[in-house]
Amino acid sequence: MTQEKSAREALEHWSTADIDSAEAAHRAARLVLDFEAHPEKYTDPESVVSPLSKIVALFQRPTVKEAAVTLRTEALPALLRLHDARLREWRKAGPQEGYDNAASDLLYVLKIFGMYRGEEALQRIIDAARIPLAPDSYMWSVALFALVKAEKEAATHVASALREPLPPGFIAVALLDMANTLAREHGVTSHAFDTAQGRERIRAFLTDEDPDHFSYAHSAAASLPFLKDAREFFTLAQAHPDVAVRMEAAWAAAWGGDALAVARLQDWSKDPKTRKRAVTYLKELGHPPAPLPKEERLRLDAMAEMSDWLEHPSEFGRPPDHLEVYDHRRLFWPPTNDERDVWLFRYRYEEEGGEPEEGVGMVGSVTFALFGEATAGLPPEDIYALHCVWELQQEGDERAPEERTVEAGRKLLGFPAR
């Protein structure tokens, strides 16, 4: 075995293995130091993942406090130096080939700095925001979330340092989310956006008409209970075209004791398209959803689950235009080996200038829609049969047939053969 292959295999091992003792962390730290001294040993021309990225992954592997402390003491100083060297490369290269890979590595390192903290690590985060490093990267949310999750004081320090002037691009959105979390969950009273520039940025987020930026308005609305004299912003948020922003504004008003805002959230809890979000807000505020008869509540919960799944960005990205119950029954469900309520919902999406897109999805076990297979042209028993086989296949269950067929599923469920 060549020295380079041995080094690469060692790095592959420590970047994926649990580091469950101080001794294991000591061995992993030695690998970091060796990588710093001899990076050429770890370069794999066939890998799309940089060796530095694997070094960074290693810092996420401790499973006990002793291991994390050992890595912080023995390896974090080397990671600081590696970061600085990579940053110099990034600044020298500019927006050329390899620029994005270098920025990605650096943002990954910032996440680790957020987890491990320390004066030098926190300063690297502040400096990166000031440069700014990849200001439109979503990884800024990951890095700052790691920081606020690790320690309130460290997150407060970074938020205060970036308060004036605010960083540009998506860094500001990530900072806004962190400031909201510090205020809402940790009682920090000095919000990073409660400045003249911060308030102007809040106004810009709430008036931005680009649907791709509506999530920024959502973050802005979440800040309203923690800003002084936010009446103007409440007006903007409550008139926003996106219902999620209007709901966030209602939560913000209810946080401040507005009973009408609570009533609005309770009204939203009766709509399957908004129920899950409304119930979450109401629970956080200590209020119940709108009272409903048990059967109606169960139906609405199932319908809300289906709507929420269809709305996910990896599916349709928005609630269906039409959603109705296709079937509901209680039966023994082989994938979970128990008796349960299961639901089928027929959904439809209207397409401007084209044919609507329709299908049937299932709720009750794994919420899913078998696009192109489960259609309203099939009887409910056939759709349950297909879902049963699909779920067993996903689990690698020995009862799963190789081919997904209605016949196989009906047999598993005890339905009569067609």
Image (spheres, helix red, strand yellow):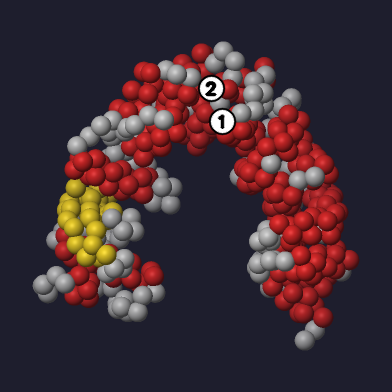
Q: Rate crowding at label 2 as few (under 14), some (14 to 19) or many (20 or more) other CA atoms within 10 Å.
A: many
Q: Are marks 2 and 1 in contact (CB under 8 Å)?
A: yes
Q: Residue at x 25, y 32 (%)?
A: 291
Residue beneath disc 1: 184
Residue, x 83% and y 56% (percent of image)? 73
Residue at 32%, 47% in the rendered image: 305
**Quadrant housing residue 413:** bottom left
Task: Residue 50: give x, y in percent of width and height.
Answer: 72, 63
Q: Is residue 235 among the parts visible in the rendering?
A: yes
Horizontally, is 367 left or right of 121 in the view?
left
Left or right position of 59 against 176: right
Q: Residue 84's spot in the image, x, y percent?
A: 84, 50
Disc 1 crowd, CA 10 A, few/some/many (<14, 14-19, 20+): some
Residue with the mark numbered 2? 225
Per the image, label 2 sits on a secondary structure element best described as helix
User: Which of these two is toward me, 158 or 355?
Assistant: 158
Q: Does 369 sit above or below residue 3?
A: above
Residue 325 placement (x, y as % from top left): 19, 47
Name the one closer to the observer, 107 or 112: 112
**Quarter of the image that includes the N terminus:** bottom right
Does residue 103 sit above or below 155 in this rendering? Answer: below
